[in-house]
Amino acid sequence: MAVEGGEAMRNKQVIFRDYVSGFPKESDMEVRKSAMKLRLPEGSDGLLVKNLYLSCDPYMRIRMAKPDADHVNSFEPGSPITGYGVARVLESGHPNFKKGDLLWGFTGWEEYSLITAPETCFKIEHTDVPLSYYTSLLGMPGMTAYAGFFEVCSPKKGETVFISAASGAVGQLVGQFAKLFGCYVVGSAGSKEKVDLLKNKFGFDDAFNYKEELDLNAALKRCFPEGIDIYFENVGGKTLDAVLLNMKLHGRIAACGMISQYNLEQPESVHNLMNIVLKRVRMEGFAVLDYYHLYPKFLEMVLPQIKEGKIVYVEDTAEGLEDASAALIGLFSGRNVGKQVVVVSQE
Amino acid sequence: MAVEGGEAMRNKQVIFRDYVSGFPKESDMEVRKSAMKLRLPEGSDGLLVKNLYLSCDPYMRIRMAKPDADHVNSFEPGSPITGYGVARVLESGHPNFKKGDLLWGFTGWEEYSLITAPETCFKIEHTDVPLSYYTSLLGMPGMTAYAGFFEVCSPKKGETVFISAASGAVGQLVGQFAKLFGCYVVGSAGSKEKVDLLKNKFGFDDAFNYKEELDLNAALKRCFPEGIDIYFENVGGKTLDAVLLNMKLHGRIAACGMISQYNLEQPESVHNLMNIVLKRVRMEGFAVLDYYHLYPKFLEMVLPQIKEGKIVYVEDTAEGLEDASAALIGLFSGRNVGKQVVVVSQE
């Protein structure tokens, strides 16, 4: 059943070269061409897929580090990078999928992949939206925003919400969900262009460029004279420290990520944790993995919102596997504007 | 109705002299004798009480600081210290109390007090236990341990629990509650005597003297080779930082207090907050104020446990208002062994 009769095909791959410390470089990855038989191994219940879109996500930096006792799911040196992507099924050994199906889930940074855990992939049923959205708005980042805001933050109408890295894949959605829910929403980002997006495209009530604020505490006091009910944490470090000074009683912090810390040999220090006691704040780390059972409910909410134009989304697209490593690394200098996607193939 | 026919009586008081920064000293308070008419003001719905026992609690250090925007309930310079205590009602303008009743709640550090918010006081119904217990095991610290452990920590049988300041007013109870609940319990304290108490009197599975550990992370790894499910946080700073390295997936931290930080001009830095994200940890600050509706349920659980000897309790008693300021300040050097109580009057 394999395409091309099972003969060996070129498979371009983005190979992870070795564990990274400090800031990752393009040369930590390399594009290689290998040969691959486009056929499922005999008896496999996996999937042979053609990758269409790949997702660049900040958490991937954590997987570049050398594994230790606390952290074991590092990339394997010499093997392709893995991550979320959108793919078309070429051959299926699994009852949930058939040839021609589109799916999103964990795949490799390569043209063709063998997916050995198809039960972790989601079949794409709605194709009247851009397919790349299944790496972003309708995929892992979208579910992260949804679960983080509605499940972890326990929002109430009228509350004040602060989002860091607010124009990113997750932040732009958290802000829009919070606005639609009836909250007052402020975001921070690292350029004028991003701040403009927050205010003018995503409808945030206010936004600031953290690089231009001499005093983050003062910036937050200006935006939240009464304090912050909900902080959606994407960056950590100095921003978190300033936020802690501005939390309201019974505030909540959904700790989604701390991108400012991922490339540091020594994490930055945080001093203001006493505010967690004084303000009775709940700070909760979460991972989208624990919330995928809500995916149907999420789609039910968000698909109509997309069609009615109530939710908009900005992606930053890199073309081809050759540009994938630069795209991934760009996340850590804030090069991307919106969700960073890599197009592997338009079909 | 006033005792002594309403004539002016001596009222010994512990006066708060002025706002404190750094380590508090005995001389930040002074004992003064004033005159007080033992009569409720006309039309008052308050209570005139005779104070019997006063409670020394770490949070009182926070009230010694100069008030700022975030923190407004400081002690008033020139007025008596206020805090939890046990008292007998001499005269009542409130329907909940009558002359002769015993109560616990917020009162003054003085022989006689006028309580203007009797609705925040609890009438003492069970007197077949030491009355001082209503400043400790059966009062605010007891409720703090109960609410913090059962409501904030969401414990499950068999989980591992670490408690800092574990021989203190709250810690000794959290450990016993956790043991009775079926957890594995380890505590840290600041002397050999306290560590012995934890192991031999309170039944902790293990305990260590944090002052004798060169590496807190290593001490925790030794006690919790599989990691910590629940951390009951009383101290903050370096201990918190080491705990963060040892939390298990989906661990919980109940942030009750951070006594190591209260006397510092600059709070210590914490570096390991990324573990909140990586381990999906929930860290929650709480105050017993939000849980007093559970007090009847708490009593129903704990009174039989006391009578059956399943719960034991250690108090450290200072005699008289003259010794009150030293007792309070002793909390911050760990002078007290067990809950620090001040006896104002045996009747």
Image (spheres, coloured by chain):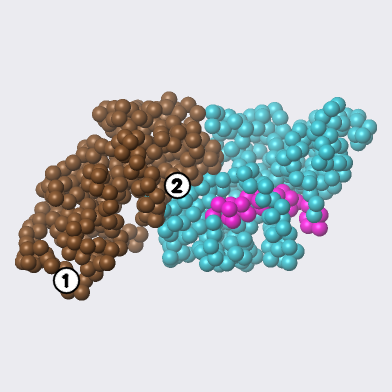
Chain colours: A brown, B cyan
Q: Nearer the viewer, residue B292 or B311?
A: B292
Which of the two discs, 2 and 1, labels the residue nearer the N terminus? 1
Query: Does the magenta portion include B141?
Result: yes
Q: Which residues are magenta?
A: B127-153
The residue that mark 1 highlights is: A41
Q: Is residue B286 visible?
A: yes
Residue at disc 2, secondary structure: helix
- Callout 2, which amino acid? Val
Q: Nearer the viewer, residue B213 or A294?
A: A294
Q: Position of residue B139 (x, y in %)?
A: 70, 49
Residue at disc 1, secondary structure: loop
Disc on res. A257 = none
Are dots 2 and 1 on a single chain? yes
Q: Say whether residue B343 is left or right of residue B90.
A: left
Q: Are marks 2 and 1 in contact (CB under 8 Å)?
A: no
Q: Say whether residue A100 is left or right of residue B86.
A: left
Residue drawn at x 13%, y 44% is A319
- Callout 1, which amino acid? Pro
The residue that mark 2 highlights is: A152
Q: Position of residue A279 (x, y in %)?
A: 53, 39
Q: Nearer the viewer, residue B302 or A97?
A: A97
Identify the subunit bearing mark 1: A
Q: Residue furthest right?
A: B5
Identify the subunit bearing mark 2: A
Quadrant assignment, res A192? top left
Quadrant assignment, res A91? bottom left
Residue drawn at x 33%, y 32% is A202
Residue drawn at x 66%, y 28% is B77
- Foreground tag (2 vs 1): 1
Q: Is residue B318 above or below residue A212?
A: below
Q: Is residue B109 visible?
A: no
Q: Position of residue B305 (x, y in %)?
A: 71, 63
